[in-house]
Amino acid sequence: MRRVKVEVTADDIDNGERGKPCSCPVALALRRVLSDVDDEFGLWKFWDKNTAKWHLGIGVNTRLTQAPSDVETFAYNFDRDIFVEPFTFEVELP
């Protein structure tokens, strides 16, 4: 596991694409932070049978880890064209 600090910048927000998991602002920020990993990054919805809820996952190397709640809120708002601001989060990646 690898713990990383990810800063989603105003440029990420300006260049991110709504509804596109590999081109959203979080994916752009992950790509910048994990430039040494040659794979796609993105946000994906997944069903957690233990909690019986949909969650947002951060995908790296085809493996998912649950996204922090502030990332879920950001993605929800960004995709619905609700105002969002730059923010920073930390996540443990596989």
Image: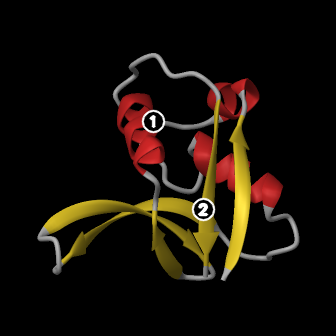
Task: Tell me where residue 85 sits by quadrant.
Answer: top right
Of the residues under marks 1 and 2, which one precedes in the sequence? 1
Give the residue at x 69% y 34%.
12
Crowd band around label 2 with a 10 angstrom C-alpha radius: few (<14), some (14–19), many (20+): some
Which residue position is annotated with label 1? 74
Q: Which element carries disc 2, helix, strand or loop? A: strand
Give the image location of residue 10, x and y in percent: 71, 24
As shown in the figure, which amino acid type bears the numbered disc 2?
Answer: Val
Which residue position is annotated with label 2? 91
Give the image location of residue 23, x and y in percent: 60, 48
Mark 1 and mark 2: Cα distance apart in space = 15 Å
Give the residue at x 66% y 83%.
1
Q: Which element carries disc 1, helix, strand or loop? A: helix
Give the residue at x 23% y 75%.
48
**In this picture, residue 31 sits left or right of residue 63:** right
Give the residue at x 56% y 44%.
24
For this orientation, the residue located farthest to the right is: 36
- In the image, residue 21 above or below residue 44: above
Give the image location of residue 92, x and y in percent: 61, 70
Crowd band around label 1 with a 10 angstrom C-alpha radius: few (<14), some (14–19), many (20+): some
- In the image, residue 16 above or below residue 55: above
Closer to the camera in the image, 57 or 79? 57
Which mark is nearer the camera, 1 or 2? 2
**In this picture, residue 53 sits left or right of residue 37:** left
